[in-house]
Image (cartoon, rainbow, N blue to C red):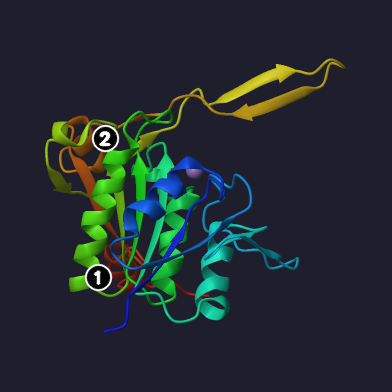
Amino acid sequence: METPLILVTNDDGIQAPGIELLANALDDCGEVWVYAPDRQQSAVGHGVSLHRPLRVGQYRERWFMVDGTPTDCVMLAVRDLLPRRPALVVSGINPGANLGDDVTYSGTVAGAFEGMLQGAPALAVSDVSYVPKHMQTAGRVATMLARRLLEEGLPPDTTLNVNVPDLPYEDLQGVAFTRMGRRHYEDDIITRQDPRGGYYYWIGGVPSHVEEDGTDFAAIEAGKVSITPLQRDLTNHHALETLTGQELAL
Ligand code: MN
């Protein structure tokens, strides 16, 4: 049987420690190829560069950097540059959680989501700490999940969003399949004055979240690995049904 090709990407740039750790962790599972942004691209979401050309440079054997977004990387790799189709696309390991509503901002999740759109089973992996002390734990979780996905695949049109507590592997409290929770975005805009009196704004702060059972947030608070299956179809089917019953005259 042909060795499965595993495409690895991230949003933190090719020099980030998380992608090195992830590529090493997946080395036993298949033939790892890396296509990653050449610089920090966190929070670019599912952006794609349509208005400028993209350049690809070799970083080392089977490692390539692209002057674009995670989505650009996966699109170029799968559609054109890889020697064969990937059996799996893995994005990460991101330092910092991708939980709840933050998922749509996330370049890490978008890299995996694009893998799904290109027809491959895909997962995004984040260590919930911005300053991880135990990223090896997320690496081991990624290896376990990659093996599973390579054997069993995923339901079609599904991306797994995986968040891992920043704990020693032995201290994990298990795995929970979860739904997306909700963020509160408050007091997030910092307003300051520049040396010439003009105002500038900085989006930041530490967002909180709604406490609800069954969510990704709840799993992480309980010390569990959170696995949220994300779906391709963003349609609110309940709203669609309700709306379809209504008359709307033009
Ligand atoms: Mn990032």
Does 143 appear above or below 235?
A: above
Instruction: State the residue position of label 2.
Output: 165
Q: Name the residue at 35% across, 39% down.
A: 127
Instruction: State the residue position of label 1.
Output: 150
Q: Name the residue at 29% across, 49% down.
A: 162
Tell me the SS state at disc 1.
Answer: helix
Does 217 appear above or below 186?
A: below
Towards the viewer: 210 or 138: 138
Does 180 appear above or below 123?
A: above
Q: Position of residue 27 (x, y in %)?
A: 34, 60
Query: Quadrant of the rendered structure where residue 151 is?
Result: bottom left
Along the polypeptide, which appears first: circle 2 or circle 1? Answer: 1
Residue 180 visible to an observer of this rendering: no
Q: Position of residue 179 (x, y in %)?
A: 23, 50
Mark 2 burial class by Cα count in 10 Å: few <14, some 14-19, many 20+: many
Left or right: residue 118 versus residue 80 is left
In the displayed orientation, state which residue is furthest to the front. 61
Query: Quadrant of the rendered structure where residue 174 is?
Result: top left
The quadrant in which the N terminus is found is bottom left
- Labels 2, 1: front one: 1
Left or right: residue 158 versus residue 250 is left
Q: Position of residue 194 (x, y in %)?
A: 79, 18
Residue type at mark 1: give it: Leu
Q: Name the residue at 34% across, 37% down.
A: 135
Residue type at mark 2: give it: Pro
Q: Name the residue at 76% across, 22% down.
A: 199
Tell me the SS state at disc 2.
Answer: loop
Which numbered marker is on residue 217?
Answer: none
